[in-house]
Image (cartoon, rainbow, N blue to C red):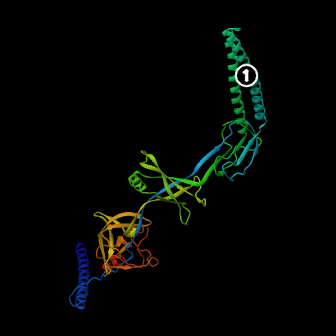
Amino acid sequence: MDGNKTVWNFHRRGKRVFVGAVSLGLTLAVSAGLIGCSGGKAAAPAAPPPVPVLAAAAERKDVPLQVHAIGAVESYSTVSVKTQVTGELTGVFFREGQDVKKGDLLFSLDKRPFEAELKKQEGNLARDLAQARNARAQAKRYEALWQTGVVSKEQFDQVQTSADALDAAVQADRAAVEDAKVQLQYCTLYSPINGRTGSLIVHQGNMIKANDNPPLVIINQVQPIYTTFTVPEQFLPEIKKFMAHGKLRVAASAPSETGAPVLGTLTFVDNMVDQTTGSIKLKAEFSNGDRRLWPGQFVNVVLTLRTQLNVVVVPSQAVQTGQQGTYVFVIRPDMTVESRLIVVGASSDGQTVVQKGLEAGERVVTDGQLRLVPNSRVEIKTAGMFQAPLDHRAGQSPSPNRLNPSQDAHPERVGGE
């Protein structure tokens, strides 16, 4: 039995050796055939295809130096209308949301109690005037009698004091009459400003108290109007510098608006920096003739400090940041790219000022930079033709029609070893 096992194992080993020899022979034959067909030289690798990119030309233009912020619209002035007397509200002479002018009648209160008080004070004044005239005449008589020695000095002083007291009472009565007239005038309320009325809080027929809350109505002046916004304190020196040479222009627009913004001027710089946020509060005034700005509204604000004349600009998406600094990929005439360091300035409306390193007319890559290295060949596409596969677009994989680079280099590995 042991001898049979040995023979069987030998045959198995012989079979393995035979199969291995056959495989090695086939491999050598195929290799020899490939070498013979190529003339004894390895095939040269194919040149990589050009990288599709978007490009734009650097240009010279005037660029405004701007500060962008989010602001809130405030009324030019706000008045909370309250009464200064207590009484019944007998009349309302405007509609809610109506535009009113300074001096327009708004409310009226019941005047009868105040008219009666005025008559009472006028009566007191008339009484005291009569008594004062009599006391003054009597004082003159006592003065003559005192000078002739008929009456004593003490009697004369008493009469003179009574006359002076009645004169003072007349003055008090006159003041009381004036106060009664003022209280009567408070029964009629007029608009103190030009503006737009809000909702009517207290309606006709209610009893109202002097200086009570809530107010009868709130009036907001919307022509002109303010917009308040804050900017980082780093801009404060430039703002003060350029304000000294003239008014600074401010543009405001609602986030949903697509038309031209509303234009105004910067009128106020706060007297201190907010230390908690490191920002400074500014305020701009707008004529608001078309009433596009409304109190309480949030708007996008653009403060223009100055205009840079005839500077080189490129699209902001062309500017890249690397370990050596800021750079762009410049497209040469032979359609290869060069990585060039630049010095950038301010950015505005999607464009960045290039202070150094680039000339007007040179083309730069604006999309597709992550697939580029210096001297890469590129193919400029239009925006409509430039669809993914760009590596920098997150969440997107290369096109399924393009082979994996490792598969292109080693086609025999497709499907496994």
Tally of numbered discs? 1
- In the image, residue 292 above or below residue 27: above
- In the image, residue 396 above or below residue 23: above
Q: Quadrant of residue 153?
A: top right
Residue displayed at 44% across by 57% down? 246
- Secondary structure of residue under mark 1: helix
Badge 1, how many Cα within 10 Å: few under 14, some, many 20+? many
Q: Quadrant of residue 323?
A: bottom left
Residue 417 visible from this viewpoint: no
What residue does disc 1 label?
132
Q: Residue furthest left?
A: 40
Asked whether, in this view, residue 96 is left or right of residue 309, the answer is: right
At label 1, which amino acid type do we have?
Ala
Q: Considering the image in quadrants, where does the C terminus appear?
A: bottom left
In terms of depth relative to the viewer, which is nearer, 193 or 125? 125
Q: Position of residue 281 (x, y in %)?
A: 47, 49
In terms of depth relative to the viewer, which is nearer, 116 or 416? 116
Q: Position of residue 57 (x, y in %)?
A: 38, 75
- In the image, residue 144 above or below residue 63: above
Q: Position of residue 381 (x, y in %)?
A: 41, 79
Residue 84 visible from this viewpoint: yes
